[in-house]
Amino acid sequence: MNMAVASPPDAFRGHCLDEQMQARLMNRIDTKFLVSAHLLDACLRGLEHHYSILEIDGNRRFTYDTLYFDTPGRQLYLDHHNGKLNRFKLRIRHYRETGGSFLEVKKKSNRERTIKNRLPLTSQTVTNNRVIPFLEEQLGRPVAGMLPALFVGYRRMTLMSPMGTERITVDTGLGFHSPDRRNSLCLPDIAVFEVKYDRKIPCSPFLERLGQLGCRPMQFSKYCIGTSLLFGHECKTNRFKPLLRRLHGICS
């Protein structure tokens, strides 16, 4: 008798959000990989003994809706494009399944560390006027003039090591939309893996697996790539052309 074999996401033990929040990794090192979506199962298969997967109410894939903000001249995009060492992104992220929304400032330091701070967006935080003080404290500058710049949506799975020192996000179904929703572009054939850890981890079964499959780390910013794809006719894209060619190669 043939026995059904669980697909890779279903083979992992589930962990709850409270367990994951104990290893928030808000100050961390990120390593990203861009692979074809059809390699997703091959990347995960056999790793169920090394990681658990976030599960909420039976769901293991979650929808993220993110709105990025920038100056009218796209200065935050240009800071990344031009290789500025100390830079930041400003966004509102909504978790569709749980209903939570957060205002987030994501900083990249000159030591290549990612530092994320966020404020829950609730009626209380808005009523108490906590948004502007939070932003000015995080950014060290006035925030007047920031405008909606790009919508990004995708589906995410999150794996975590038993000790909570390593977290892996798996993003698929990327879609980019202009703030007025008149321009859109989807990348259904792309999977983005991001390995997040608080220090140099001595051994990562997931990184070893990706190496065995010939996957190599690369810089990838959803905001910058989405901006390049939708608005490349009106902003600089030279720094991102190798990555854009890689995307074209995977999708073609």
Image (cartoon, rainbow, N blue to C red):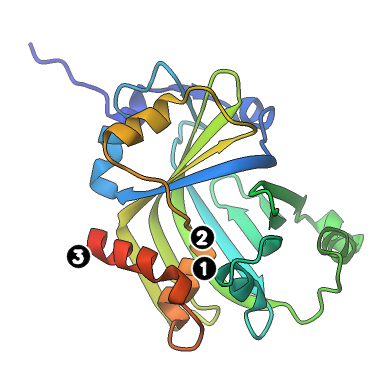
Q: Secondary structure at mark 3?
A: loop
Q: Is residue 187 left or right of residue 171?
A: left
Alpha-carbon distance for marks 2 and 3? Answer: 21 Å
Q: Quadrant of the N terminus?
A: top left
Q: Quadrant of the C terminus?
A: bottom left
Asked if the residue at tag 1 contacts the one at tag 2, i.e. Cβ–Cβ closer than 8 Å, the answer is yes
- Give, as a three-letter code, the residue at label 3: Ser
Task: State the residue position of label 2.
Answer: 221
Q: Is residue 173 above or below residue 239?
A: above
> Residue 252, labelled with which disc?
3
Task: State the residue position of label 1.
Answer: 224
Q: Is residue 205 above or below residue 140?
A: above
**Residue 177 % position (x, y):** 47, 73
**Residue sitting farthest toward the top:** 1
- Give, as a three-letter code, the residue at label 1: Cys
**Residue 197 % position (x, y):** 59, 34
Which residue sits at x=28%, y=48%? 37
Q: Secondary structure at mark 1?
A: helix
Which residue sits at x=27%, y=40%? 214
**Residue 227 % position (x, y):** 49, 74
Give whichever of 132, 162 is nearer the camera: 162
Q: Is residue 77 above or below residue 15?
A: below
Report the label total.
3
**Residue 251 % position (x, y):** 24, 62
Give whichever of 162, 62 is nearer the camera: 162
